[in-house]
Image (cartoon, coloured by chain):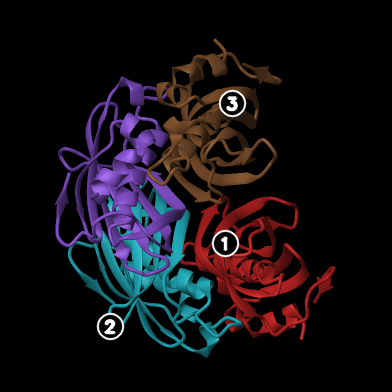
Chain colours: A brown, B purple, C cyan, D red
Amino acid sequence: MKLSEFLLNDRFARQAGAEILTIEPGYAKVRMEVTPDHLNATGVCQGGALFTLADLAFAAVANSYGQITLSLSANITFLKAASNGWLYAEAREVHHHNRIPYIEVRIAQEDGTLIAIMTSSGYRKKDILPVEPITDTEQS
Amino acid sequence: MKLSEFLLNDRFARQAGAEILTIEPGYAKVRMEVTPDHLNATGVCQGGALFTLADLAFAAVANSYGQITLSLSANITFLKAASNGWLYAEAREVHHHNRIPYIEVRIAQEDGTLIAIMTSSGYRKKDILPVEPITDTEQS
Amino acid sequence: MKLSEFLLNDRFARQAGAEILTIEPGYAKVRMEVTPDHLNATGVCQGGALFTLADLAFAAVANSYGQITLSLSANITFLKAASNGWLYAEAREVHHHNRIPYIEVRIAQEDGTLIAIMTSSGYRKKDILPVEPITDTEQS
Amino acid sequence: MKLSEFLLNDRFARQAGAEILTIEPGYAKVRMEVTPDHLNATGVCQGGALFTLADLAFAAVANSYGQITLSLSANITFLKAASNGWLYAEAREVHHHNRIPYIEVRIAQEDGTLIAIMTSSGYRKKDILPVEPITDTEQS
Protein backbone atom coordinates (compact mmCIF):
# COMPACT_ATOMS: atom_id res chain seq x y z
CA MET A 1 0.00 0.00 0.00
CA LYS A 2 1.16 3.49 -0.79
CA LEU A 3 1.16 6.21 1.89
CA SER A 4 -1.40 8.21 -0.10
CA GLU A 5 -3.69 5.16 -0.07
CA PHE A 6 -3.16 4.66 3.66
CA LEU A 7 -4.14 8.28 4.25
CA LEU A 8 -7.46 7.74 2.48
CA ASN A 9 -8.39 6.22 5.85
CA ASP A 10 -8.41 9.74 7.28
CA ARG A 11 -12.18 9.84 7.23
CA PHE A 12 -12.53 13.31 8.71
CA ALA A 13 -10.26 14.84 6.09
CA ARG A 14 -11.90 12.88 3.31
CA GLN A 15 -15.38 14.01 4.30
CA ALA A 16 -14.11 17.58 4.33
CA GLY A 17 -13.04 17.01 0.73
CA ALA A 18 -9.29 17.16 1.32
CA GLU A 19 -7.27 15.09 -1.14
CA ILE A 20 -3.58 14.41 -1.51
CA LEU A 21 -1.98 15.48 -4.79
CA THR A 22 1.70 14.70 -4.21
CA ILE A 23 3.97 13.20 -1.57
CA GLU A 24 7.76 13.29 -1.69
CA PRO A 25 10.19 12.72 1.17
CA GLY A 26 9.86 15.98 3.12
CA TYR A 27 7.16 17.54 0.93
CA ALA A 28 3.45 17.09 0.30
CA LYS A 29 0.67 18.93 -1.50
CA VAL A 30 -3.02 18.59 -0.69
CA ARG A 31 -6.10 20.42 -1.94
CA MET A 32 -9.69 21.07 -0.87
CA GLU A 33 -12.51 23.02 -2.44
CA VAL A 34 -14.31 25.44 -0.13
CA THR A 35 -18.04 24.84 -0.41
CA PRO A 36 -20.98 26.19 1.63
CA ASP A 37 -20.49 23.17 3.92
CA HIS A 38 -17.10 24.56 5.04
CA LEU A 39 -18.37 27.93 6.19
CA ASN A 40 -18.85 29.18 9.72
CA ALA A 41 -21.61 31.47 10.96
CA THR A 42 -19.99 34.59 9.51
CA GLY A 43 -19.81 33.01 6.06
CA VAL A 44 -16.09 32.26 5.78
CA CYS A 45 -14.21 28.96 5.81
CA GLN A 46 -14.19 27.63 9.40
CA GLY A 47 -10.82 27.50 11.13
CA GLY A 48 -11.34 23.80 11.70
CA ALA A 49 -11.81 23.17 7.97
CA LEU A 50 -8.52 24.92 7.24
CA PHE A 51 -6.87 23.00 10.08
CA THR A 52 -8.22 19.70 8.71
CA LEU A 53 -6.66 20.42 5.33
CA ALA A 54 -3.37 21.42 6.99
CA ASP A 55 -3.43 18.35 9.22
CA LEU A 56 -3.73 15.98 6.26
CA ALA A 57 -0.79 17.75 4.58
CA PHE A 58 1.11 17.48 7.87
CA ALA A 59 0.36 13.74 8.08
CA ALA A 60 1.52 13.20 4.50
CA VAL A 61 4.86 14.90 4.95
CA ALA A 62 5.44 13.81 8.55
CA ASN A 63 4.98 10.17 7.61
CA SER A 64 6.83 10.42 4.30
CA TYR A 65 9.92 8.78 5.82
CA GLY A 66 7.98 5.71 6.93
CA GLN A 67 7.85 6.18 10.70
CA ILE A 68 4.57 7.04 12.39
CA THR A 69 4.68 10.73 13.31
CA LEU A 70 2.15 12.62 15.40
CA SER A 71 1.60 16.33 15.87
CA LEU A 72 2.47 17.49 19.38
CA SER A 73 1.55 21.11 19.05
CA ALA A 74 0.51 23.27 16.14
CA ASN A 75 0.16 26.97 15.51
CA ILE A 76 -2.15 28.28 12.81
CA THR A 77 -2.29 31.91 11.77
CA PHE A 78 -5.25 33.07 9.71
CA LEU A 79 -4.09 35.59 7.11
CA LYS A 80 -7.12 36.05 4.88
CA ALA A 81 -10.69 34.76 4.88
CA ALA A 82 -11.79 32.45 2.06
CA SER A 83 -15.36 31.62 1.25
CA ASN A 84 -15.08 29.60 -1.95
CA GLY A 85 -12.65 28.16 -4.47
CA TRP A 86 -9.81 25.67 -4.27
CA LEU A 87 -7.26 25.83 -1.50
CA TYR A 88 -3.83 24.21 -1.80
CA ALA A 89 -1.81 23.18 1.24
CA GLU A 90 1.93 22.70 0.74
CA ALA A 91 3.75 21.03 3.63
CA ARG A 92 7.51 20.98 4.12
CA GLU A 93 9.65 19.37 6.81
CA VAL A 94 11.71 22.48 7.51
CA HIS A 95 13.73 20.73 10.21
CA HIS A 96 14.28 17.07 9.42
CA HIS A 97 14.77 15.14 12.63
CA ASN A 98 14.41 11.48 13.57
CA ARG A 99 12.46 12.29 16.73
CA ILE A 100 11.00 15.82 16.72
CA PRO A 101 10.63 17.28 13.22
CA TYR A 102 9.33 20.79 12.55
CA ILE A 103 6.87 21.09 9.71
CA GLU A 104 5.36 24.11 7.97
CA VAL A 105 2.13 24.06 5.96
CA ARG A 106 1.14 27.00 3.79
CA ILE A 107 -2.44 27.22 2.58
CA ALA A 108 -3.01 29.35 -0.51
CA GLN A 109 -5.62 30.01 -3.13
CA GLU A 110 -5.14 29.05 -6.76
CA ASP A 111 -3.52 32.43 -7.52
CA GLY A 112 -1.02 32.03 -4.69
CA THR A 113 -2.71 34.32 -2.15
CA LEU A 114 -1.84 33.03 1.31
CA ILE A 115 -4.86 32.11 3.46
CA ALA A 116 -3.21 30.53 6.51
CA ILE A 117 0.11 29.17 7.72
CA MET A 118 0.38 26.27 10.14
CA THR A 119 3.59 25.22 11.83
CA SER A 120 3.82 22.10 13.94
CA SER A 121 6.24 20.14 16.06
CA GLY A 122 5.88 16.44 15.41
CA TYR A 123 6.84 13.40 17.41
CA ARG A 124 8.26 10.52 15.41
CA LYS A 125 7.59 7.14 16.98
CA LYS A 126 9.65 4.03 16.43
CA ASP A 127 6.74 2.25 14.79
CA ILE A 128 6.92 1.80 11.04
CA LEU A 129 3.85 2.49 8.93
CA PRO A 130 2.55 -0.43 6.81
CA VAL A 131 3.28 1.42 3.57
CA GLU A 132 5.81 1.28 0.77
CA PRO A 133 8.79 3.62 1.14
CA ILE A 134 8.59 6.78 -0.93
CA THR A 135 11.67 7.06 -3.04
CA ASP A 136 10.69 9.77 -5.44
CA THR A 137 7.39 11.52 -6.08
CA GLU A 138 4.15 9.72 -5.27
CA GLN A 139 1.11 10.97 -7.12
CA SER A 140 -2.26 9.89 -5.88
CA MET B 1 -31.96 35.88 17.69
CA LYS B 2 -29.73 34.46 20.38
CA LEU B 3 -25.98 34.02 19.81
CA SER B 4 -26.32 30.25 20.17
CA GLU B 5 -28.93 30.31 17.37
CA PHE B 6 -26.71 32.49 15.20
CA LEU B 7 -23.86 30.01 15.66
CA LEU B 8 -26.04 27.18 14.32
CA ASN B 9 -25.08 28.73 10.99
CA ASP B 10 -21.57 27.34 11.52
CA ARG B 11 -22.21 24.54 9.08
CA PHE B 12 -18.79 22.95 9.33
CA ALA B 13 -19.00 22.67 13.12
CA ARG B 14 -22.59 21.45 12.93
CA GLN B 15 -21.73 18.70 10.47
CA ALA B 16 -18.90 17.64 12.77
CA GLY B 17 -21.54 17.28 15.49
CA ALA B 18 -20.34 20.14 17.69
CA GLU B 19 -23.12 21.75 19.71
CA ILE B 20 -23.18 24.64 22.14
CA LEU B 21 -24.30 23.88 25.68
CA THR B 22 -23.81 27.20 27.46
CA ILE B 23 -22.72 30.75 26.71
CA GLU B 24 -22.06 33.40 29.33
CA PRO B 25 -20.12 36.64 28.94
CA GLY B 26 -16.52 35.38 28.85
CA TYR B 27 -17.35 31.67 29.04
CA ALA B 28 -18.77 28.97 26.78
CA LYS B 29 -19.13 25.21 26.80
CA VAL B 30 -19.51 23.06 23.69
CA ARG B 31 -19.58 19.30 23.16
CA MET B 32 -19.05 16.78 20.38
CA GLU B 33 -19.19 13.02 20.27
CA VAL B 34 -16.24 11.31 18.62
CA THR B 35 -17.53 8.81 16.05
CA PRO B 36 -15.73 6.78 13.37
CA ASP B 37 -16.30 9.75 11.04
CA HIS B 38 -13.94 11.89 13.17
CA LEU B 39 -10.96 9.55 12.98
CA ASN B 40 -7.78 9.94 10.97
CA ALA B 41 -5.80 7.18 9.29
CA THR B 42 -4.22 6.02 12.56
CA GLY B 43 -7.63 5.63 14.18
CA VAL B 44 -7.69 8.61 16.52
CA CYS B 45 -9.70 11.82 16.41
CA GLN B 46 -8.28 14.05 13.65
CA GLY B 47 -6.60 17.27 14.76
CA GLY B 48 -9.00 19.19 12.54
CA ALA B 49 -12.02 17.67 14.30
CA LEU B 50 -10.64 18.79 17.67
CA PHE B 51 -9.85 22.20 16.20
CA THR B 52 -13.39 22.51 14.82
CA LEU B 53 -14.84 21.86 18.27
CA ALA B 54 -12.41 24.36 19.82
CA ASP B 55 -13.16 26.93 17.14
CA LEU B 56 -16.89 26.82 17.82
CA ALA B 57 -16.21 27.28 21.55
CA PHE B 58 -13.86 30.15 20.64
CA ALA B 59 -16.56 31.78 18.50
CA ALA B 60 -19.13 31.46 21.28
CA VAL B 61 -16.98 33.11 23.92
CA ALA B 62 -15.27 35.60 21.61
CA ASN B 63 -18.62 36.91 20.41
CA SER B 64 -20.30 36.77 23.82
CA TYR B 65 -19.91 40.52 24.26
CA GLY B 66 -21.76 41.28 21.02
CA GLN B 67 -18.93 42.48 18.78
CA ILE B 68 -17.77 40.33 15.89
CA THR B 69 -14.47 38.73 16.90
CA LEU B 70 -12.16 36.69 14.67
CA SER B 71 -9.27 34.41 15.52
CA LEU B 72 -5.93 35.82 14.37
CA SER B 73 -3.70 33.02 15.45
CA ALA B 74 -4.28 29.86 17.46
CA ASN B 75 -2.07 27.30 19.12
CA ILE B 76 -3.35 23.78 19.79
CA THR B 77 -1.45 21.23 21.84
CA PHE B 78 -2.51 17.61 21.63
CA LEU B 79 -2.21 15.99 25.04
CA LYS B 80 -3.92 12.63 24.61
CA ALA B 81 -5.50 10.76 21.72
CA ALA B 82 -9.25 10.10 21.79
CA SER B 83 -11.04 7.64 19.57
CA ASN B 84 -14.56 7.68 20.93
CA GLY B 85 -16.85 9.23 23.54
CA TRP B 86 -18.01 12.74 24.29
CA LEU B 87 -15.58 15.62 24.33
CA TYR B 88 -16.34 18.88 26.14
CA ALA B 89 -14.69 22.16 25.19
CA GLU B 90 -14.69 24.93 27.78
CA ALA B 91 -13.65 28.35 26.51
CA ARG B 92 -12.67 31.30 28.68
CA GLU B 93 -11.65 34.84 27.78
CA VAL B 94 -8.55 34.88 29.99
CA HIS B 95 -7.67 38.42 28.94
CA HIS B 96 -10.73 40.54 28.31
CA HIS B 97 -9.91 43.26 25.84
CA ASN B 98 -11.98 45.43 23.53
CA ARG B 99 -9.64 44.87 20.58
CA ILE B 100 -7.37 41.85 21.05
CA PRO B 101 -8.71 39.35 23.58
CA TYR B 102 -6.85 36.17 24.58
CA ILE B 103 -8.98 33.05 24.81
CA GLU B 104 -8.22 29.57 26.13
CA VAL B 105 -10.19 26.45 25.21
CA ARG B 106 -9.69 23.20 27.10
CA ILE B 107 -10.99 20.00 25.57
CA ALA B 108 -11.60 17.15 27.98
CA GLN B 109 -13.34 13.81 28.15
CA GLU B 110 -16.38 13.22 30.34
CA ASP B 111 -14.15 12.19 33.28
CA GLY B 112 -12.11 15.39 33.01
CA THR B 113 -9.06 13.92 31.23
CA LEU B 114 -7.54 16.68 29.13
CA ILE B 115 -7.31 15.90 25.40
CA ALA B 116 -6.11 19.20 23.95
CA ILE B 117 -5.68 22.86 24.85
CA MET B 118 -6.13 25.65 22.34
CA THR B 119 -5.17 29.25 22.99
CA SER B 120 -5.98 32.01 20.56
CA SER B 121 -5.54 35.72 20.05
CA GLY B 122 -8.72 37.25 18.72
CA TYR B 123 -9.40 40.47 16.86
CA ARG B 124 -12.58 42.30 17.87
CA LYS B 125 -14.09 44.33 15.09
CA LYS B 126 -16.33 47.33 15.53
CA ASP B 127 -19.26 45.55 13.87
CA ILE B 128 -22.04 44.40 16.15
CA LEU B 129 -23.51 40.92 15.71
CA PRO B 130 -27.26 40.74 14.97
CA VAL B 131 -27.94 38.92 18.23
CA GLU B 132 -29.47 39.70 21.62
CA PRO B 133 -27.00 40.69 24.31
CA ILE B 134 -26.10 37.94 26.76
CA THR B 135 -26.75 39.16 30.25
CA ASP B 136 -26.56 35.96 32.20
CA THR B 137 -26.35 32.34 31.11
CA GLU B 138 -27.70 31.31 27.71
CA GLN B 139 -28.57 27.67 27.35
CA SER B 140 -29.12 26.35 23.88
CA MET C 1 21.53 21.18 46.47
CA LYS C 2 18.03 22.54 46.12
CA LEU C 3 16.47 23.10 42.68
CA SER C 4 16.27 26.84 43.34
CA GLU C 5 20.02 26.84 44.02
CA PHE C 6 20.71 24.82 40.87
CA LEU C 7 18.72 27.34 38.85
CA LEU C 8 20.95 30.17 40.08
CA ASN C 9 23.27 28.80 37.40
CA ASP C 10 20.90 30.24 34.81
CA ARG C 11 23.22 33.13 34.15
CA PHE C 12 21.11 34.79 31.48
CA ALA C 13 18.05 34.90 33.72
CA ARG C 14 20.11 36.05 36.69
CA GLN C 15 21.65 38.91 34.77
CA ALA C 16 18.19 39.96 33.66
CA GLY C 17 17.30 40.12 37.36
CA ALA C 18 14.88 37.20 37.41
CA GLU C 19 14.71 35.44 40.76
CA ILE C 20 12.77 32.43 41.99
CA LEU C 21 10.39 33.01 44.88
CA THR C 22 8.71 29.62 45.28
CA ILE C 23 8.82 26.15 43.81
CA GLU C 24 6.33 23.38 44.55
CA PRO C 25 5.68 20.22 42.56
CA GLY C 26 3.79 21.57 39.54
CA TYR C 27 3.99 25.25 40.49
CA ALA C 28 6.60 28.01 40.60
CA LYS C 29 6.68 31.77 41.09
CA VAL C 30 9.45 34.04 39.82
CA ARG C 31 9.84 37.81 39.78
CA MET C 32 11.84 40.46 37.93
CA GLU C 33 11.90 44.24 38.16
CA VAL C 34 11.66 46.07 34.86
CA THR C 35 14.45 48.65 34.68
CA PRO C 36 15.67 50.84 31.80
CA ASP C 37 18.02 47.95 30.88
CA HIS C 38 15.01 45.79 29.96
CA LEU C 39 13.49 48.20 27.45
CA ASN C 40 13.48 47.99 23.69
CA ALA C 41 13.76 50.87 21.23
CA THR C 42 10.13 51.91 21.71
CA GLY C 43 10.60 52.16 25.48
CA VAL C 44 8.73 49.07 26.66
CA CYS C 45 9.99 45.83 28.15
CA GLN C 46 11.60 43.76 25.37
CA GLY C 47 9.84 40.53 24.41
CA GLY C 48 13.05 38.66 25.15
CA ALA C 49 13.17 40.02 28.71
CA LEU C 50 9.62 38.78 29.31
CA PHE C 51 10.50 35.45 27.71
CA THR C 52 13.58 35.12 29.92
CA LEU C 53 11.45 35.59 33.03
CA ALA C 54 8.90 33.09 31.72
CA ASP C 55 11.61 30.61 30.77
CA LEU C 56 13.06 30.59 34.30
CA ALA C 57 9.57 29.99 35.71
CA PHE C 58 9.13 27.22 33.11
CA ALA C 59 12.42 25.62 34.16
CA ALA C 60 11.46 25.76 37.83
CA VAL C 61 8.13 24.05 37.36
CA ALA C 62 9.20 21.71 34.57
CA ASN C 63 12.06 20.36 36.69
CA SER C 64 10.08 20.32 39.95
CA TYR C 65 9.60 16.55 39.69
CA GLY C 66 13.33 15.88 39.46
CA GLN C 67 13.72 14.88 35.81
CA ILE C 68 15.49 17.18 33.37
CA THR C 69 12.81 18.81 31.22
CA LEU C 70 13.39 21.00 28.17
CA SER C 71 11.06 23.31 26.30
CA LEU C 72 10.25 22.05 22.82
CA SER C 73 8.07 24.85 21.64
CA ALA C 74 6.62 27.89 23.35
CA ASN C 75 3.97 30.43 22.51
CA ILE C 76 4.00 33.87 24.10
CA THR C 77 1.20 36.38 23.72
CA PHE C 78 1.86 39.99 24.66
CA LEU C 79 -1.21 41.46 26.31
CA LYS C 80 -0.01 44.80 27.67
CA ALA C 81 3.24 46.74 27.53
CA ALA C 82 5.18 47.32 30.75
CA SER C 83 7.96 49.83 31.16
CA ASN C 84 8.73 49.66 34.87
CA GLY C 85 7.81 47.94 38.14
CA TRP C 86 7.89 44.36 39.35
CA LEU C 87 6.61 41.52 37.20
CA TYR C 88 5.58 38.18 38.66
CA ALA C 89 5.56 34.98 36.62
CA GLU C 90 3.46 32.10 37.90
CA ALA C 91 4.04 28.76 36.18
CA ARG C 92 1.76 25.75 36.39
CA GLU C 93 2.04 22.30 34.90
CA VAL C 94 -1.49 22.23 33.47
CA HIS C 95 -1.00 18.76 32.01
CA HIS C 96 1.24 16.60 34.16
CA HIS C 97 2.93 14.00 32.01
CA ASN C 98 6.05 11.88 32.40
CA ARG C 99 7.23 12.63 28.88
CA ILE C 100 5.55 15.68 27.35
CA PRO C 101 4.09 18.04 29.95
CA TYR C 102 2.18 21.22 29.08
CA ILE C 103 3.05 24.26 31.14
CA GLU C 104 1.45 27.70 31.35
CA VAL C 105 3.22 30.80 32.66
CA ARG C 106 1.26 33.98 33.40
CA ILE C 107 3.20 37.22 33.81
CA ALA C 108 1.42 39.95 35.76
CA GLN C 109 2.14 43.23 37.46
CA GLU C 110 1.92 43.65 41.22
CA ASP C 111 -1.78 44.60 40.97
CA GLY C 112 -2.57 41.47 38.97
CA THR C 113 -2.77 43.10 35.52
CA LEU C 114 -1.76 40.47 32.96
CA ILE C 115 1.25 41.42 30.81
CA ALA C 116 1.90 38.21 28.88
CA ILE C 117 1.00 34.53 28.83
CA MET C 118 3.42 31.85 27.73
CA THR C 119 2.44 28.24 27.12
CA SER C 120 4.98 25.57 26.37
CA SER C 121 5.25 21.90 25.56
CA GLY C 122 8.14 20.34 27.44
CA TYR C 123 10.15 17.21 26.87
CA ARG C 124 11.04 15.27 30.00
CA LYS C 125 14.27 13.32 29.67
CA LYS C 126 15.17 10.22 31.66
CA ASP C 127 18.10 12.02 33.30
CA ILE C 128 17.64 13.00 36.92
CA LEU C 129 18.74 16.45 38.07
CA PRO C 130 21.39 16.56 40.83
CA VAL C 131 18.97 18.24 43.25
CA GLU C 132 16.97 17.27 46.31
CA PRO C 133 13.38 16.20 45.63
CA ILE C 134 10.78 18.87 46.34
CA THR C 135 8.22 17.48 48.70
CA ASP C 136 6.40 20.59 49.74
CA THR C 137 7.12 24.27 49.14
CA GLU C 138 10.67 25.39 48.48
CA GLN C 139 11.36 29.04 49.18
CA SER C 140 14.54 30.48 47.84
CA MET D 1 18.26 58.60 11.68
CA LYS D 2 18.38 55.16 10.13
CA LEU D 3 16.19 52.32 11.45
CA SER D 4 19.30 50.36 12.44
CA GLU D 5 20.43 53.35 14.51
CA PHE D 6 17.00 53.70 16.10
CA LEU D 7 17.11 50.01 17.08
CA LEU D 8 20.38 50.56 18.94
CA ASN D 9 18.02 51.91 21.59
CA ASP D 10 16.92 48.33 22.22
CA ARG D 11 18.99 48.14 25.38
CA PHE D 12 18.03 44.61 26.31
CA ALA D 13 19.05 43.25 22.91
CA ARG D 14 22.22 45.30 22.91
CA GLN D 15 23.30 44.03 26.30
CA ALA D 16 22.68 40.50 25.09
CA GLY D 17 25.10 41.27 22.27
CA ALA D 18 22.59 41.16 19.42
CA GLU D 19 23.52 43.40 16.50
CA ILE D 20 21.82 44.17 13.22
CA LEU D 21 23.73 43.30 10.06
CA THR D 22 21.24 44.13 7.32
CA ILE D 23 17.76 45.56 6.89
CA GLU D 24 15.80 45.59 3.64
CA PRO D 25 12.07 46.08 3.15
CA GLY D 26 10.70 42.73 4.34
CA TYR D 27 14.03 41.21 5.37
CA ALA D 28 16.56 41.59 8.17
CA LYS D 29 19.62 39.76 9.46
CA VAL D 30 20.92 39.98 13.02
CA ARG D 31 23.70 38.14 14.85
CA MET D 32 24.74 37.37 18.41
CA GLU D 33 27.64 35.40 19.85
CA VAL D 34 26.72 32.85 22.50
CA THR D 35 28.97 33.36 25.53
CA PRO D 36 28.86 31.85 29.03
CA ASP D 37 26.59 34.77 29.98
CA HIS D 38 23.87 33.44 27.67
CA LEU D 39 23.67 29.97 29.21
CA ASN D 40 20.99 28.55 31.47
CA ALA D 41 21.49 26.13 34.36
CA THR D 42 21.91 23.14 32.06
CA GLY D 43 24.67 24.87 30.13
CA VAL D 44 22.89 25.73 26.90
CA CYS D 45 21.76 29.05 25.48
CA GLN D 46 18.71 30.23 27.44
CA GLY D 47 15.42 30.36 25.56
CA GLY D 48 15.14 34.04 26.46
CA ALA D 49 18.50 34.81 24.87
CA LEU D 50 17.37 33.18 21.63
CA PHE D 51 14.07 35.01 21.86
CA THR D 52 15.85 38.33 22.40
CA LEU D 53 17.88 37.79 19.23
CA ALA D 54 14.73 36.80 17.33
CA ASP D 55 12.81 39.77 18.71
CA LEU D 56 15.40 42.25 17.47
CA ALA D 57 15.27 40.64 14.02
CA PHE D 58 11.47 40.81 14.21
CA ALA D 59 11.61 44.52 15.11
CA ALA D 60 13.97 45.24 12.23
CA VAL D 61 11.83 43.59 9.60
CA ALA D 62 8.47 44.54 11.11
CA ASN D 63 9.43 48.22 11.13
CA SER D 64 11.20 48.14 7.77
CA TYR D 65 8.22 49.78 6.07
CA GLY D 66 8.25 52.76 8.43
CA GLN D 67 5.16 52.13 10.56
CA ILE D 68 5.53 51.12 14.20
CA THR D 69 4.79 47.41 14.41
CA LEU D 70 4.46 45.36 17.60
CA SER D 71 4.46 41.62 18.16
CA LEU D 72 1.07 40.33 19.27
CA SER D 73 1.92 36.70 19.70
CA ALA D 74 4.99 34.65 18.91
CA ASN D 75 5.78 30.98 18.70
CA ILE D 76 9.34 29.73 19.13
CA THR D 77 10.38 26.13 18.53
CA PHE D 78 13.74 25.00 19.85
CA LEU D 79 15.35 22.63 17.37
CA LYS D 80 18.88 22.20 18.70
CA ALA D 81 20.78 23.40 21.75
CA ALA D 82 23.70 25.80 21.26
CA SER D 83 26.29 26.58 23.88
CA ASN D 84 28.77 28.74 21.99
CA GLY D 85 29.55 30.36 18.64
CA TRP D 86 27.78 32.91 16.49
CA LEU D 87 24.08 32.69 15.81
CA TYR D 88 22.43 34.41 12.85
CA ALA D 89 18.77 35.34 12.81
CA GLU D 90 17.14 35.95 9.44
CA ALA D 91 13.70 37.52 9.53
CA ARG D 92 11.24 37.64 6.65
CA GLU D 93 7.80 39.16 6.36
CA VAL D 94 6.16 36.08 4.88
CA HIS D 95 2.77 37.77 4.70
CA HIS D 96 3.03 41.47 3.98
CA HIS D 97 0.03 43.25 5.39
CA ASN D 98 -0.67 46.86 6.35
CA ARG D 99 -2.25 45.86 9.65
CA ILE D 100 -1.36 42.32 10.72
CA PRO D 101 1.81 41.01 9.09
CA TYR D 102 3.18 37.49 9.66
CA ILE D 103 6.90 37.27 10.20
CA GLU D 104 9.24 34.28 10.38
CA VAL D 105 12.68 34.36 12.02
CA ARG D 106 15.12 31.48 11.55
CA ILE D 107 18.08 31.24 13.91
CA ALA D 108 21.02 29.23 12.63
CA GLN D 109 24.67 28.61 13.37
CA GLU D 110 27.43 29.75 11.03
CA ASP D 111 27.28 26.44 9.12
CA GLY D 112 23.53 26.79 8.57
CA THR D 113 22.37 24.35 11.26
CA LEU D 114 18.97 25.50 12.45
CA ILE D 115 18.76 26.25 16.18
CA ALA D 116 15.28 27.73 16.52
CA ILE D 117 12.41 29.12 14.44
CA MET D 118 10.18 31.91 15.66
CA THR D 119 6.98 32.97 13.92
CA SER D 120 5.01 35.99 14.99
CA SER D 121 1.89 37.92 14.18
CA GLY D 122 2.54 41.63 14.30
CA TYR D 123 0.25 44.59 14.71
CA ARG D 124 1.08 47.60 12.56
CA LYS D 125 0.05 50.89 14.11
CA LYS D 126 -0.69 54.07 12.21
CA ASP D 127 2.23 55.87 13.87
CA ILE D 128 5.26 56.47 11.71
CA LEU D 129 8.73 55.81 13.12
CA PRO D 130 11.13 58.78 13.20
CA VAL D 131 13.51 57.08 10.78
CA GLU D 132 14.50 57.41 7.13
CA PRO D 133 12.62 55.13 4.74
CA ILE D 134 14.55 52.06 3.65
CA THR D 135 14.64 51.94 -0.10
CA ASP D 136 17.26 49.33 -0.70
CA THR D 137 19.65 47.54 1.66
CA GLU D 138 20.67 49.22 4.89
CA GLN D 139 23.92 47.99 6.40
CA SER D 140 24.65 48.93 9.95
Which of pointers 2 and 3 indicates the residue nearer the eye?
2
Q: Position of residue B48 (x, y in %)?
A: 41, 35
Q: CA distance from mark 3 to mark 1?
A: 34 Å
Pointer 1 residue:
D100
In screen coordinates, is B131 left or right of C123?
A: left
Which of pointers 3 and 1 indicates the residue nearer the eye?
1
Q: Please determine if labels 3 and 1 lie on a single subunit.
A: no
In screen coordinates, is C92 left or right of C58?
A: left
- Residue D22 visible: yes
Pointer 2 residue:
C111
Q: Is residue D105 above or below residue D13?
A: above
User: Callout 1 environment at 10 Å: few (<14), some (14 to 19), or many (20+)?
Assistant: many
Which of pointers 1 and 2 indicates the residue nearer the eye?
1
Identify residue type, mark 2: Asp
Q: Residue at x 21, y 41 (%)?
A: B113
Q: Position of residue B75 (x, y in %)?
A: 43, 50
Q: Along the line of sight, which residue is nearer the eye, A111 or C49? A: A111
Q: Residue at x 63, y 71 (%)?
A: D59
Q: Secondary structure at mark 1?
A: loop
Report in which chain the residue with disc 1 lies: D
Q: CA distance from mark 1 to mark 2?
A: 30 Å
Identify residue type, mark 3: Ser
Q: Residue at x 56, y 51 (%)?
A: A79
- Residue C65 visible: no
Q: Please determine if labels 2 and 3 lie on a single subunit.
A: no
Q: Along the line of sight, which residue is nearer the eye, C43 or C9? A: C43
Pointer 3 residue:
A64
Marks 3 and 1: CB-CB under 8 Å?
A: no
Identify residue type, mark 1: Ile
Please tell me in which quadrant of the rendered image residue B21 appears.
Answer: top left
Q: Is residue B50 above or below residue A3?
A: below
User: Callout 2 environment at 10 Å: few (<14), some (14 to 19), or many (20+)?
Assistant: few
